[in-house]
Image (cartoon, rainbow, N blue to C red):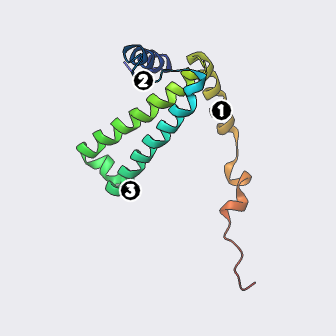
Amino acid sequence: MLLTMQDLMDIQNQLQEKYKGVWEGNSPRTAQHHLLYAVEEIGEVSAIMKKRSPEAIVADAGVRAHFCEEMADVFMYLTDVLLCCGVTAEEFDSAYRAKADRNLRRDFPREHSQYLQDPPSADA
């Protein structure tokens, strides 16, 4: 069975309960720390891609396992941020689906055409 958002939140709550008094816990006060930890983990994912290459993630089982482990860390900390702020799985589901629906209706090439064009040459 695949993980749901509720599963992720339940697992993070279990981990927080197990390490109560050791970890700093989930509260609005600690949300920023969890977000910074997530950024740190994204850095570790980036290092894998830079040092080992995205192709290695596809082709090398060991690199792929390390990549998946670091991505799991990212999701764990981001889930903690949601929990710190009292966001429910249902709220996140609704926001995610609404954002995806908006993105599916958008015309990114038209909206960002100024960024997709070559800059004018210095000679002009």
- Dividing the picture into quadrants, the one containing residue 28 is top right
User: Which type of secondary structure does the marked residue at label 1 adopt?
Assistant: helix
Determine whether label 3 and label 2 are within 8 Å by CB.
no
Q: Position of residue 103 (x, y in %)?
A: 66, 38
* Residue found at x 28% / y 39%: 65
**First in sequence: mark 3 or mark 1?**
3
Mark 2 neighbour class, 10 Å CA radius: few under 14, some 14 to 19, many 20 or more: few
The residue beneath circle 3 is: 50
Q: Position of residue 85 (x, y in %)?
A: 61, 22
Pick the quarter of the image with the N terminus: top left
The residue beneath circle 2 is: 23
User: Which type of secondary structure does the marked residue at label 3 adopt?
Assistant: helix
| Foreground label between 2 and 1 | 2
* Residue found at x 43% / y 41%: 41
Callout 1 amino acid: Lys
Pick the quarter of the image with the C terminus: bottom right
The residue beneath circle 1 is: 99
Per the model, the C-alpha gap separating discs 3 and 1 is 30 Å
Q: Looking at the rendered structure, which numbered label has been put on residue 46?
A: none
User: Which type of secondary structure does the marked residue at label 2 adopt?
Assistant: loop
- Dividing the picture into quadrants, the one containing residue 93 is top right
